[in-house]
Structure formats: C-alpha cells, structure tokens
Amino acid sequence: MKFLVTGAAGFIGFHTAMRLCQAGHQVLGIDNLNDYYSVELKQARLSQLTGMPNFSFIQQDIADRDGMQVLFQKHQFERVIHLAAQAGVRYSLENPHVYADANLSGFVNILEGCRHNAVSHLVYASSSSVYGMNSKVPFAIDDAVDCPISLYAATKRANELMAHTYAHLYRIPTTGLRFFTVYGPWGRPDMAPFKFTKAILDSQPIDIYNNGDMSRDFTYIDDVVEGIVRIQGCPPPYADESEQARQGAPARLFNIGLGSPVRLLDFVGCIEAATGVQAIKHMQPMQPGDVPQTWADTSALAQRTGFRPETPLQEGVTRFVDWYCDFYGV
C-alpha cells in the first residue's frame, strides 16, 4: 500500500516508517525538521530510512495549507499515519502558538487531505495526557476527558473531536491512539528516559518531580509500532455494526501502553542498573501541567487486534541505554 507518514524524522514516526518499509509498503515521509530538539538526531534517523528503496522524504510543514493540499493531490495516498505534532507539556506553557499551528491548523490540513483524496484510513497520534487528573485507574478510553491541564493535552483532545467530526460528516475512517510515555532507541532528548540517561552518564544531577511520588506507564517503542501497524490494518467499520450505529461515525480511540505503571524512582533504578552508575537525585515539587500517574487500560486494543504491549521495563531500558552509548560514543 502507499502510506503517508507525517513526522517521519521524529521518534515514533521514524520507527513506524521503517517497519512499514520492511513490510514492503511504499512510504512517503514528511517532517518540517524544526529545532525543538536536535536536528542532527532527526537527520540521523532519516539517514537510516533513506537506505530503504521504498522510502522517500519531503521536508514539509503540515501547517502549510497549500503545500499539504498539493502533497495529497499529487501522491494519492491509500492510508495516512499522522505522527507529526508539537510535543511536550512544559514547552506548551511557554510557546502556545506553535501548538495551535502544528496540532490544530496542521491537523485540519491532514483531515482535509484525507477528505478530498479518498484516503481509506487515517491513524493519528493522541496522548495519555488527555486524561488529565483522572483519578480512576487504569485509564480507559470511555473515561471522561473534559479537563485537560496543559495546552498540549487540550490540542490532542481537540484532534480526537475533529477526527470524529470528519468521520461523521465525510465517512473518513479515523483511529486515534493515546500513547503512554514511549521510550526506546532513537528516543527524544526532551523526554525523561533520555535526559536521565544523559545526566547519569555525565555525572550530573537529575530532577525528580513531586519528590518522586509519580508513576508512568512506560511503553517500549517496538510495542507502540506493533500497535500502530496492527491498527492501521483495522479501519473502523461503518454504521452497519451496532457500536458504530450508536456512535454515528467510523471513528475509534485506543490506548497503547504497557498497562503496568512504574514509580519514577524505580525507572531511574533501571537506568542505574543498565549504566552501572548511581544517579544524583534532586527532589523537586510537582511542575505545572504534570499529572501524578498514568496507567493504560489496553483491553480495547487487545480485543480489536489480539495484541498487548509486553516488553519488560528493564529489557527496554537496557536496549535504550545500549543504543545511547553506541550512538553518542559513551
């Protein structure tokens, strides 16, 4: 099949594009290569992809309405996996307009491209952040998500509502995936696993927020990609099935997480074990926009695809640390 993968130079986008290419699909990747974090790392990811004969790349900003219209018209994609976004909770507190441009305007451009060019399935990235301060655990896809506590979370929830609207109005099958703290080789430098590993190996202190009383449902990248690939092959049904008849649109949402939250201090312990270095810990208060815990209920994903993420934390952390040391020559 012919795929568009947005954010192909990003962490999840790179791994997803690679997996699709290895399966024999034609993949066009786009990315604006912004400097939110190291452009050199993004270029290094792309260098891995450009060796694939069925991969091509165009530097393109999804917020560019005219450019996206031309892209869709020219290439006539069968399926779209939309992973480009302005990420980061804390960054959204200081730079709100870039979130409006990428995550709102950019997403409208994706939806319009799918609408006018007969895309058979749009799979897009949402986030566990939409659950906000939800106290019910584990987080289930039918939980209320009406109170986001960061602009980033609000834009991701807006994406879900926008996708549902387009699915209802134009019968575009859409699937949103709420990712839970993805980590692994080629990971993002702005995320805790990368920042902690770098600081520990450099004998620098790490900040532990909420005095360590936080937990996250850390999910290994290979499990996330497996979920994406399986879901893209399962477009939501139309209103001939009872669930969709009630919902009124070929739109669905799924959590992708390990389903096993880990205390932040225990996660640091895994990095210490993998590096053989003791962390210097600075306890800090809770930061604005943060939540005390995340925990994915993945039963809907398992029911639909027969798959549950399963990579053990220590195994995943060791793979990440090995990649980090190799890539940076530590």
Image (cartoon, rainbow, N blue to C red):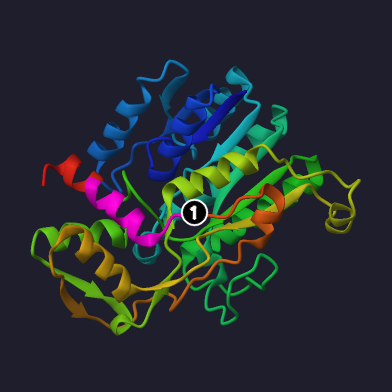
Residue 271 to residue 329: above or below: below
Please indicate whether residue 23 sits to the left or right of residue 120 in the image: left
**Number of numbered discs overlaid on the protein picture:** 1
Residue type (three-letter) at the residue carrying disc 1? Ala
Chain part drawn in magenta: 310-322
**Residue drawn at (33%, 48%), measured in percent from left and top?**
187
Residue 105 versus residue 277: which sits nearer the camera? 277
> Which residue is outermost to the left?
203
Give residue 215's position: percent from left, percent from top: 41, 75
Residue 26 sits inside the magenta stretch: no
Q: Quadrant of residue 299?
A: bottom right
Could you say whether the residue bearing mark 1 is in a helix, strand or loop?
A: helix
Is residue 102 visible to us here?
no
Give residue 233's position: percent from left, percent from top: 67, 37
Q: Which residue is mark 1?
A: 100
Which SS does the magenta portion mostly show?
helix
Quarter of the N terminus within the rendering: top right
Please indicate whether residue 94 sits to the left or right of residue 227 in the image: left
Residue 31 to residue 105: above or below: above
Q: Quadrant of residue 156?
A: bottom right
Give residue 9's position: percent from left, percent from top: 37, 36
**Residue drawn at (45%, 45%), measured in percent from left and top?**
222
Please indicate whether residue 301 sits to the left or right of residue 200 in the image: right
**Residue drawn at (66%, 26%), measured in percent from left and top?**
78
